[in-house]
Amino acid sequence: MTFSKLKLSPPILDAVSELGYETPTAIQKKAIPAILSGRDLVASAQTGTGKTASFVLPLLEMLKGERKRRAKRLRALILVPTRELAVQVESNICQYGKYVDVKSMAMFGGVDSEPQKQQLIDGIDILVATPGRLLDMVHQRALHFDELQVLILDEADRMLDMGFIGDINKIIERLPEQRQNLLFSATIPDGVRLLADTAIDNPIEVSIADNSATTPQISQWVVSVDKDIKSTLLSHLIKEHQWTQALIFIRTKHGAAKLVSQLEKRGIKAESIHSGRSQAVRTQILADFKSGEIGILVATGIASRGIDIDELTRVVNYDLPDDADDYIHRIGRTGRAGSCGEAVSLVSMDDFKRLCAIERRLDQILDRRKIEGFTTVKELPDSNLNFVSSSTGEKKPKKRDKKKRDEASREERKPKPRKSNNNSHTETSDGSSTSTPDSQNPWLNIRKK
Ligand code: AMP
């Protein structure tokens, strides 16, 4: 299927084709016609699947064309959890809307509100905003919703996780009853379902959770490492494997600053973004990371939300996140739009429970790799994503894909413990690998759910 089948006008198709997009992704194929039909929509789609274009393209189609803007009015509102995502989505609107007359702006907190108020004075077609700053503006009567036609909740699960539900409800109460509502969320937990039930009218539901053709292929692996040598191991991986680009997630802002200085002491140029840095500095660092000027970026989870970089090859979990869904969000930064990516996690014993939760969430055991020269005092136990066979009492994997199961049963005919991944892969100091190729190793190329 090509984009031209999606009833988008030539100026929008031209912009899309200039960006090199040849075919719509799965979410785009499903969401664009649904949105253009005027229906409400609830879509379960992760970052990295092309979800932004799936709502921005039809939005541009619906709003394009000459129309007098009224002061302080907007026609479409996109609510997002973070300022980084606001900037990112708005820049996508500018890219996709290059040849149409649609005016957009990003609005977020942590910066002077005066320039944002000025921008609103002549009216806006599409406003991308974080909930807190938007409410401030409403209270200051800097904008009015009486001309609003479309509401989009982007990364709804993330907004709820970040405690925005109160603000979102207050905003929704102020919107005109007659409007189109679109909700995008990586996962649809109960809170998001409740929000959808209250704010959205008889929606079309689309989910691309099990999509195969366009879901990114991400090679995920973990290294068991003692906590006190994590930074040494990371430096080794960066140098030995010549990682020129990595987005490294770490738990705290102090940890981020410390890690950057440890890397720099070992001759590795790195930068960090976290809540302790000003918005201007964060924006500049992100721009430098995108342009490739900064190769190694250490980020806390919150500060990194919304980072959208084509061809981000690698994310590293220096610390695993508390929430397994956050892991999925993080690795969604790489392997975008069908390209390959790598997600590496440095896991110490105190992260083991988190690793188990992630493996349960993925329903997959992540490949464990050993790095030559790094021995671990507290070696991670085997994955607990196993069950005990009721007939033999032996442990075997809870889930293997069908082909693998059939092969195994032909060869073995009786249940055996799953081969531990602990020693399944050895990396030599020159970075070469002695593991089976990824294509033959079911534990390596794990499809994002
Ligand atoms: P998103 O899920 O919106 O964060 O998009 C992920 C990445 O996919 C972005 O970098 C987009 O530029 C890119 N993208 C979106 N749609 C397509 C497409 N149809 N073909 C190729 N790349 C795309």
Image (cartoon, rainbow, N blue to C red):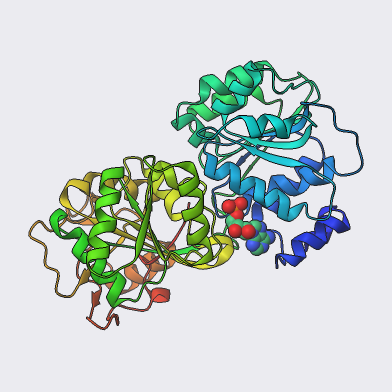
Given the current orientation, which residue lies at the most extreme left position? 377
Query: Is residue 320 rendered to the left or right of residue 333?
Result: left
Q: Nearer the viewer, residue 124 or 176?
A: 124
Can you tell which quarter of the image residue 21 is in?
bottom right
Q: Splitting the image into four quadrants, where does ligand 1 fall?
A: bottom right
Is 295 placed above or below 25 here?
below
Please name the residue shown 53% across and 29% down the image.
192
Residue 177, position as x, y percentages in the image:
76, 18
Asked whether the viewer can see residue 414, the reply is: no
Is 285 placed above or below 107 here?
below
Q: Nearer the viewer, residue 153 or 407?
A: 153
Query: Is residue 79 rendered to the left or right of residue 433?
Result: right
Query: Is residue 367 rendered to the left or right of residue 423?
Result: right
Residue 180, position as x, y percentages in the image:
75, 30
Residue 337, position as x, y percentages in the image:
59, 61
Asked whether the viewer can see residue 311, the reply is: yes
Can you tell which quarter of the image residue 39 is in?
top right
Please name the residue shown 44% across and 48% down the image.
304
Query: Is residue 273 rendered to the left or right of residue 234?
Result: right
Can you tell which quarter of the image residue 230 is in?
bottom left
Q: From the image, which quarter does the N terminus lie in? A: bottom right
Is 317 placed above or below 75 here?
below
Residue 440, position as x, y percentages in the image:
39, 75
